[in-house]
Image (tube, helix red, strand yellow):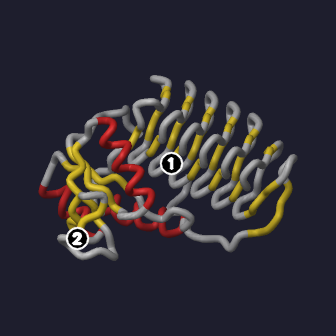
């Protein structure tokens, strides 16, 4: 993980709802968006009034040719196996990933942020936290002190994590969920909207309710690495 830094130009991989949102965050920050990479749209098409530059596999070539260009990653929403595998494949190509951080997000100076982190408007990350690569904190998500979030996790709007929480890879915290201190959310787990989590959640399980209880088990998938 590296300190926060500005990128001069960004191309967004994923011409969809999430890509549109990232384009808006980058515009608010005054960052130039060169265009979109997408595996479905033809080169020369447009999305959000910006050109389609090519498929995602071209990301490595583009960043190799242009030292000022980095990639904002906007694919795999609700498909965390895809989200993790595509990101890790691009990382192996040496792709530079942009952080997309809304100006209204509050991040303590002691926080460490991985590559490709996305923080929507009103997100708050308190002191001593570590946010891994390709983690997304949606609007108004709150992460209290000394919490660790591993790569490819996704926090929905208005969820709240207390201190010393550990969120493992590819976990999904639902809208308005609350997690008490010192709880671990296992890899690939799903915390349903509005749940109140009082104890550890095992990997690849879905919990819901107040207090949260196991509702089903999820077929395990590749979360893109260890730890």
Q: Nearer the viewer, residue 79 or 81?
A: 79
Q: Position of residue 186 (x, y in %)?
A: 69, 54
Q: Is residue 217 left or right of residue 13?
A: right
Left or right of 176 on screen, residue 84: left
Q: Residue 195: which numbered mark, if any?
A: none
**Above/below status of 59 relative to 126:** below
- Quarter of the image containing the N terminus? top left
Q: Nearer the viewer, mark 2 or mark 1?
A: 2
Answer few, some or many: residues within 10 Å of disc 2's Cα (few below 14, many 20 plus, some between 14 and 19).
Answer: few
Residue 138 coordinates in the image, percent (x, y): 54, 45
Up/down of 161 relative to 47, above or below: above
Residue placed at 66% from the left, 42% from the top?
159
- Identify the residue under disc 2: 45
Q: Which secondary structure, mark 1? A: strand
SS type, badge 2: loop
Please rate how many residues cluster around mark 1, counting C-alpha atoms within 10 Å: few if below 14, some from 14 to 19, many from 20. Answer: many
Residue occupying image coordinates x 21% and y 46% = 9
Q: Is residue 154 left or right of residue 9?
A: right
Taking the spot 58% from the left edge, 55% from the top edge, the residue there is 169
Q: Earlier in the sequence, mark 2 or mark 1?
A: 2
50 vs 180: above or below: below
Q: Quadrant of residue 160?
A: top right
Residue ranking furthest to the left: 65
Q: How many marks?
A: 2
**Mark 2 and mark 1: span between their CA atoms?**
27 Å
Which residue lies under the disc numbered 1?
A: 136
Contact check, label 2 and label 1, Cβ < 8 Å: no
């Amino acid at each position: 993980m590296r300190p926060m830094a500005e990128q001069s130009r960004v191309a967004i991989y994923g011409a969809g709802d999430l890509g549109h949102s990232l384009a808006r965050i980058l515009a608010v920050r005054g960052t130039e968006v060169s265009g979109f990479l997408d595996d479905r749209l033809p080169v020369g098409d447009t999305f959000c009034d910006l050109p389609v530059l090519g498929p995602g596999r071209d990301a490595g070539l583009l960043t190799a040719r242009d030292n000022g260009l980095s990639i904002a990653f906007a694919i795999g929403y609700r498909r965390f196996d895809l989200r993790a595998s595509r990101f890790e494949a691009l990382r192996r190509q040496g792709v530079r990933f942009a952080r997309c951080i809304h100006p209204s997000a509050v991040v303590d100076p002691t926080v460490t942020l991985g590559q490709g982190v996305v923080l929507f408007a009103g997100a708050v990350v308190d002191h001593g936290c570590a946010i891994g690569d390709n983690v997304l904190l949606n609007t108004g998500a709150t992460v209290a002190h000394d919490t660790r979030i591993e790569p490819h996790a996704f926090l929905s709007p208005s969820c709240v994590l207390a201190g010393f929480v550990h969120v493992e890879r590819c976990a999904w915290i639902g809208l308005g969920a609350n997690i008490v201190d010192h709880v671990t959310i296992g890899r690939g787990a799903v915390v349903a909207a509005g749940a109140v989590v009082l104890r550890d959640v095992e990997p690849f399980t879905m919990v819901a309710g107040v207090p949260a209880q196991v509702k089903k088990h999820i077929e395990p998938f590749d979360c893109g690495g260890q730890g």
